[in-house]
Amino acid sequence: MVVELASSHPGFADPVYRARRNDIAALALNYRPGTPIPAAEYTAQEHEIWAVVSRELAVKHDRYATAEYLEGAARLGLPRDRIPQLEEVSLALEPLTGFRYVPAAGLVPLRDFYGVLADGLFHSTQYIRHHSVPFYTPEPDVIHEVIGHANALAHDRYAALYRLAGAAARRVESEEALEFVSKVFWFTLEFGVMRERGELRAYGAGILSSYGEIEEFRGMDIRPLDVAAMGTTHYDITKYQDVLFQADSLQHLEDVVGDFWATCDDDSIAKLVATAV
Ligand SMILES: [Fe+2]
């Protein structure tokens, strides 16, 4: 297994890091559903990246994360001093909300990634970012997948929203409708923000796993929660997200986005697209 990295990737010119990436990707390729997720032998340096980032993020979460995300984090109790194995995360999560982790070697096709959320399965990368820039990653690494997503998946109400997104991805047939569903996921479960106790807080995994973005989101272009707008707004994954959509509360998110995912089909999405232009 050879993992391709862009020439701008912090680990591009580091042969040791590239060999690690290939080894870790091979673990996912060898994984068989129903068996334990193969353990990655992380180095002391890799555990240290997790420890540094996880400590800093925990401080920021107290200030910027929603109450339910913090509740999920408290229930899950991720280690702060070392990278947990995905199997360990999965075993801790399953009794809480039924979600389990599945290792992914790289990018998973949209329909598979989202579809299996309906079954309570979450595809996750297993590698960690390059040590030269511990607070930055150009792609989702284990810090994003576990600190960002598992803490949310440990709360029943967020877990229910992930399942609904999965059911929607399975229900729609056209690629356009699938992309619309995935964009709504992007602007909510990845980059969603919410009014809470008079201030703006984040519940999206992309914000809550990004040391830089978490300090910036309150200053972004904050728009009202609107499914048609989210499903048709363009985004660039390589930059900080400058357009964010705000729910008034978790109940509001469930009413607007949860209901959309629970009921949408190709026709209803085509109508939403027509109203958005
Ligand atoms: Fe993510």
Image: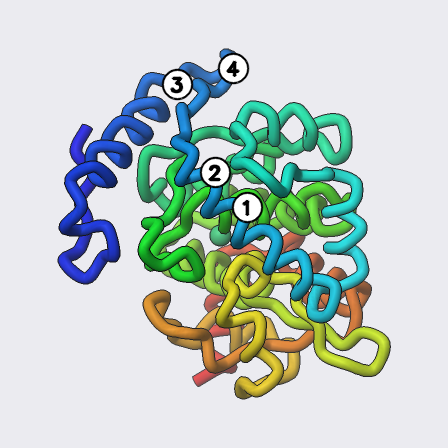
Label 1 sits on residue: 51
Q: Please name the residue that numbered disc 2 is placed on.
A: 47
Q: Amino acid at mark 4?
A: Pro
Label 3 element class: loop
Amino acid type indicated by mark 1? Ala
- The residue at 83%/82% (across/down) is 198
Q: Is residue 201 above or below residue 85?
A: below
Seen from this angle, which residue lies furthest top?
Answer: 35
Whether residue 71 sits left or right of residue 79 in the image: it is right
Front position in the image: 159 or 52: 52
- Dot 4 falls on a residue whose secondary structure is loop
Above or below — where is 17 with respect to 34? Answer: below
**Location of residue 271 in the rendering, given as x and y in whole percent from the top left corner:** 51, 72
Q: Is mark 1 within 8 Å of ligand 1?
A: no
| Quadrant position of the C terminus in the picture | bottom left
Task: State the residue position of label 3.
Answer: 31
Label 1 and label 2: CA atoms lie apart by 6 Å
Q: Which residue is mark 4?
A: 36
In space, the residues marked 3 and 2 are separated at their CA atoms by: 23 Å
Quadrant housing residue 223: bottom right
Q: Are marks 3 and 2 in contact (CB under 8 Å)?
A: no
CA gap between label 4 and label 2 equals 21 Å
Q: Residue at x 79, y 56 (%)?
A: 68
Disc 4 or disc 1, which is closer to the eye?
1
